[in-house]
Amino acid sequence: CDDFFMLNPFTSEQERSLKNDVYCADLPSREEYIQLLEDCGFHNVIFEDRTGPWTAYVNERLKAFVANRERFEGIHGESPYKHLLHFYTAIISLFNSGSLGGVRIAAEKKP
């Protein structure tokens, strides 16, 4: 599964953005995430840090979104554009800060 995790501690402003813009108020660190999975009966946890590729992706996604504003607004209107722009900008800020990480996790459930 793909998910977010706390790469470095968040500032209070970043915590607010996570809660209000991204809707994920409580993110564990790498170590906490692995421990949570193991406590739930998973083993052979593979924690693949995807922060670099995800950071590049969200930055490129915003550039493409802004470049296609006219087309998007022609189909969906201005309000959805502004909401997505706000979300995309919040995600970029969090990734570019070095605090938000992206992960791909694989694990096996103990019988």
Image (cartoon, rainbow, N blue to C red):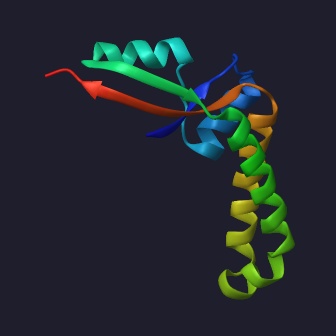
* Residue 71 percent location from the top left of the image: 77, 84
Which quarter of the rendered picture does the C terminus lie within?
top left
90 w.r.t. 111: above or below? below
| Up-down relation of residue 106 to residue 11 (above or below) | below
Image quadrant where one finds the N terminus: top left
Q: Residue at x 80, y 66 (%)?
A: 64
Residue sitting farthest toward the left? 111
Relative to 70, say whether 15 is above or below.
Answer: above
How many labels, in total? 0
Q: Residue at x 72, y 25 (%)?
A: 99
Q: Toward the viewer: 25 or 69?
A: 69
Q: Position of residue 35 (x, y in %)?
A: 40, 12
Q: Residue at x 35, y 19 (%)?
A: 44
- Nearest the viewer among 94 and 17 is 94
Q: Report whether 30 appears left or right of 108.
A: right
In the image, residue 58 sits, relative to residue 70, either above or below, namely above
Q: Residue 36: x, y in percent?
A: 38, 17
Which residue occupies the foreground of this view, 4 or 42?
42
| Quarter holding residue 5 | top right
In this view of the protein, which residue sits in the foreground, 56 or 14? 56
Residue 66: image x %, image y %?
Answer: 84, 67
Q: Residue at x 63, y 35 (%)?
A: 50
